[in-house]
Amino acid sequence: MSAQLRVAMIGHGFMGAAHSVGWRQAPAAFDLPLTPVMSVIVGRDADKTSAAADRWGWAQHAADWREVIERDDVDVVDIVTPGDTHAEIAIAALAAGKHVLCEKPLANSVAEAQSMAEAARDAAGRGIRAMVGFTYRRVPAATLMRDMIEAGRIGAVRQVRASYRQDWLADAEAPMTWRLDKDRAGSGALGDIGAHAIDLTQFVTGTSVTEVSGILETLVRERPLLAEGSGLSGTAAEGRGEVTVDDVAMFTGRLSSGALASFEATRFATGRKNALEIEISGDRGALRWNLEDMNVLEFHDATRPSVEQGFTRILVTEPDHPYLSGWWPAGHMLGYEHGFSHQVKDLVEAISTGVDPHPTFADGLSVQRVLDAVERSSAASSAWTAV
């Protein structure tokens, strides 16, 4: 048996469930050099935390994350709390000698993200690793897109179109949630889902966003409150709460290669449930991927004879495709949860080999700087703003 890697997860809820599946499934699907052990889950509400521990397979539950990160029987701290707590927990965990996985966006501000990146850099000198959870990098079709661009299959990248469209707030009477509170979430559609579009663009192209021109809009400025905290279910309470984040973010950008990019992040795209989409146009071809059809990558080879050209549909389920060796026979589809198993695989292997896992906290900081530049651009009437 391999040595154990004992995990404490801070927070639960939706992302806690997804991360729990990843920790549970990765050692069954892949031959890992260290065995993750789901030791303890932490939350403020004892009853809810206990229920989450029972449901997802955590051995213990606790209420005080500060005590948990000091425990000798914890090796990794997985942070799935709202953004306003990321910096405090991550920096303290790294100082305590724990490896850290932190959900995206890395923080609620550039200053916080900078502090986290510096703490991660210092911890790396002591053999402690930190990673930010941009899991869509690890969807096999998205990783294959990166590999094909790196191999020159579409030539020089000229233009990128990236969007993340959802409709869960299209109803103006949908209730308030912590994601609509700037103090807790940092930003709205921009940071919550736009961060994925930014990171995926930088990941697959191997470039960075250097300047932006954008606009943010809050389409519904008040929503009904719930009697029970910040969830999307509960008993309606009297009164309405102020929405202090953006509902829609749209911006253009320039990449470090000189290529142009357009970005959209919205929670008001009626009929779009989880449509993260990216299309890369090069001088020798193009690639397109959409999360709502996540096992398929479309490839246009512009070097073929004109009578043979057109987008080819690649079903990314072959054993030689990224991450697929651990799963099912070709044609048996993967789902949303598999990216979290791939995230665990990459983190555990990086810890075992003593290298920094990607995306690093420095990568998370780079995305945070783009988010900040978009906000500054919108406040300056969409003026072009350096990242």
Image (tube, rainbow, N blue to C red):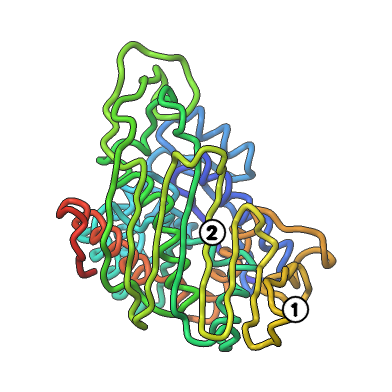
Foreground of the two, 268 or 354: 268
Which mark's residue is nearer the viewer, 2 or 1? 2
User: Amino acid under label 2?
Assistant: Glu
Badge 2 or badge 1: first in the primary sequence: 2
Q: CA distance from mark 2 to mark 1?
A: 24 Å
Local packing at callout 1 (Cα closer than 10 Å; few below 14, some 14-19, many 20+) is few
Foreground of the two, 177 or 348: 177
Exactly how many numbered labels are in the figure? 2
The local secondary structure at tag 2 comes to strand
Position of the C terminus, as image quadrant, is bottom left
- Where does the image place residue 365, in percent across and percent down from the top left? 31, 66
- Where does the image place residue 380, in percent across and percent down from the top left? 15, 54
Label 2, on which residue? 277
- Name the quadrant containing residue 348: bottom right
Residue occupying the point 40% across, 29% down: 230
- Name the quadrant containing residue 116: bottom left
Position of the N terminus, as image quadrant, is bottom right
Label 1, on which residue? 320
User: Amino acid under label 1?
Assistant: Asp
- Name the quadrant containing residue 368: bottom left
The local secondary structure at tag 1 comes to loop
- Where does the image place residue 371, in percent across and percent down from the top left? 29, 58
Left or right, residue 108 beside residue 205:
left
